[in-house]
Image (tube, helix red, strand yellow):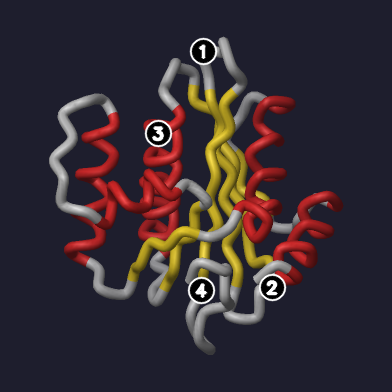
């Protein structure tokens, strides 16, 4: 799924991205739940107030996406991130002892217990809607579920589909 291909009929995907402003003591996560046609079902954004590395932010983003879909009872899901290092770390077997290790272990534990969840890397151009979602909490300073996509996210959903 390097190109962000739509999942099989009846399956879902979540695009996820973390946003960090250099020198900031916070980061954001944007998530976008779509059906097999690429149709926007729901979004989620959050802002976490603590300094992290890019790798840690990206793995926490994937972890939050897994926890979100698990709490919603969604099955048959593909999680897509444009962070190659985070996806490789989660899908790999290397033990991480740094701060990032906790999120990687949580993700691996969820994947071990749920054969219907997979994690894949997608090109950044096919993940732009999630990037727009990650920008929202900087403005609002909140955790928010979004049931109807903001205009720039809606435009990006169509743009993402073009690059799949």
> Could you say whether the residue bearing mark 3 is in a helix, strand or loop?
helix
Tell me the residue at 68%/26% (across/down): 138
**Vertical order, 32 against 19 (above or below):** below
C-alpha distance separating marks 2 and 3: 29 Å
Marks 4 and 2 close (CB-CB < 8 Å): no
Q: How many marks?
A: 4
In the image, 26 versus 164, the foreground residue is 164
- Front position among marks 2 and 3: 3
Marks 4 and 1 close (CB-CB < 8 Å): no
**Vertical order, 154 against 77 (above or below):** above
Q: Earlier in the sequence, mark 4 or mark 1?
A: 4
Q: Earlier in the sequence, mark 3 or mark 1?
A: 1
Q: Earlier in the sequence, mark 3 or mark 4?
A: 4
Q: Position of 35 compared to 62: left or right?
A: right
Residue highlighted by disc 2: 39
C-alpha distance separating marks 3 and 1: 15 Å
The percent position of residue 124, horizontal first and vertical second, equals: 62, 52
Q: Residues within 10 Å of mark 2 (few under 14, many from 20)?
A: some
C-alpha distance separating marks 3 and 4: 25 Å
> Could you say whether the residue bearing mark 2 is in a helix, strand or loop?
loop
C-alpha distance separating marks 4 and 1: 33 Å
Q: Earlier in the sequence, mark 4 or mark 2?
A: 4
Q: Quadrant of residue 125?
A: bottom right
Marks 3 and 1 close (CB-CB < 8 Å): no
Residue highlighted by disc 3: 55
Tell me the residue at 61%/21% (across/down): 21
């Amino acid at each position: 799924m390097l190109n962000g291909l739509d999942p099989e009929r009846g399956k879902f995907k979540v695009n996820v991205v973390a946003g960090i402003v250099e020198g900031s003591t916070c980061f954001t996560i944007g998530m976008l739940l779509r059906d097999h046609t690429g149709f926007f079902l729901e979004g989620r954004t959050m802002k976490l107030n603590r300094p992290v590395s890019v790798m840690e932010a990206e793995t926490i983003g994937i972890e939050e996406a897994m926890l979100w879909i698990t709490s919603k009872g969604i099955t048959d899901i593909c999680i897509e991130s444009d962070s190659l290092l985070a996806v490789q770390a989660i899908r790999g077997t290397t033990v991480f002892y740094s701060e990032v290790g906790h999120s990687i272990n949580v993700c691996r534990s969820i994947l071990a217990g749920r054969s219907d969840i997979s994690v894949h890397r997608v090109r950044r151009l096919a993940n732009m809607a999630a990037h727009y979602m990650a920008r929202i909490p900087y403005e609002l300073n909140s955790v928010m579920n979004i049931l109807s996509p903001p205009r720039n996210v809606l435009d990006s959903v169509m743009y993402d589909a073009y690059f799949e």
